[in-house]
Image (cartoon, rainbow, N blue to C red):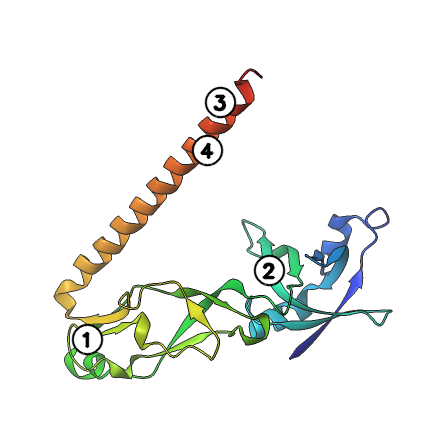
């Protein structure tokens, strides 16, 4: 397990802008069994730990100047919309005896014969997978071996993925992760993906509109 050292941050003594100029990013540690702790994180060191652990592997968070250590996940990273640099970090300490859900990236490895020998094109339907497991069993990533794609229309499904012991996903076993298609079908497949994403966005907008309407109704409803 990776170790990562941080410092406590005194909210009233140090301004956030001054910290960022020095390469320090503000952060917070929280969880169901601890009080929120304000922290300072060396941005350069954080980028290194993020590359190794990702957002789904436990790290050993040490508070400098004390003996406190916490097993945490890098739960959320707020980024500058222009530069993409982290401007705030959330560390989350889960209950180790309870399963939690995280999103894990899929890493596509190997050489697909259909690409090399037949000029096929790889279409990735899923790039990341939401999984559920005890914190100690959460994988950093899930590998997808594309060398199984030997002819056109070959597919790798959710049920073909090798998940670590104790790791589960709610996705259907027959959902397509990746497939190989002839060059002529590439535009068709990409158009299908764009269509699905537009539909998802519309559903989210509709849900938010319904929630907003419900909130307004609740606020304006006269008490009995």
> Sequence-wise, which precedes: disc 1 or disc 4?
1
Displayed quadrant of residue 48: bottom right
Give how far apart the Cα atoms at labels 4 and 2 are: 26 Å
Q: Earlier in the sequence, mark 1 or mark 3?
A: 1
The residue labelled by disc 1 is 154
The image quarter containing residue 31 is bottom right
User: Residue drawn 15% across and 68% down?
Assistant: 183
181 to 224, vertically: above or below? below
43 vs 213, nearest the viewer: 213
* Residue that appears at 59% across and 69% down: 50
Locate residue 47, reporting x and y percent: 62, 68
Residue position marked by numbered label 3 in the rendering? 217
Judge left or right: residue 16 versus residue 82: right
Badge 1 vs badge 4, beta-carbon distance below 8 Å: no
Image coords of residue 86 (percent x, y): 61, 57
Classed neighbour count for the residue bearing mark 4: other residues with Cα under 10 Å, few (<14), some (14–19), many (≥20): few
**Element type at mark 2:** strand
Marks 1 and 3 close (CB-CB < 8 Å): no
């Amino acid at each position: 397990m990776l170790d990562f050292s941080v410092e406590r941050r005194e909210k009233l003594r140090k301004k956030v802008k001054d910290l960022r100029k020095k390469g320090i990013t503000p952060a917070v540690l929280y969880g169901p069994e601890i009080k929120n702790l304000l922290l300072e994180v060396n941005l350069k060191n954080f980028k290194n730990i993020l590359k190794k652990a990702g957002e789904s592997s436990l790290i050993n968070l040490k508070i400098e100047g004390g003996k406190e250590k916490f097993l945490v996940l890098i739960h959320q990273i707020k980024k500058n919309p222009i530069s993409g640099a982290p401007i705030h970090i959330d560390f989350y300490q889960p209950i180790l005896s309870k399963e939690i859900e995280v999103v894990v990236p899929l890493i596509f490895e190997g050489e697909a014969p259909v690409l090399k020998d037949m000029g096929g094109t790889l279409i990735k339907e899923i790039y990341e997978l939401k999984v559920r497991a005890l914190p100690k069993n959460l994988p950093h990533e899930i590998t997808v071996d594309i060398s199984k794609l030997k002819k056109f229309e070959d597919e790798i499904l959710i049920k073909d993925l090798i998940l670590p012991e104790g790791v589960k996903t709610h996705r259907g076993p027959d959902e397509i992760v990746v497939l190989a298609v002839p060059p002529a079908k590439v535009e068709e497949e990409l158009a299908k993906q764009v269509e699905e994403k537009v539909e998802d966005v519309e559903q989210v907008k509709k849900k938010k509109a319904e929630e907003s309407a419900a909130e307004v109704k609740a606020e304006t409803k006269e008490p009995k």
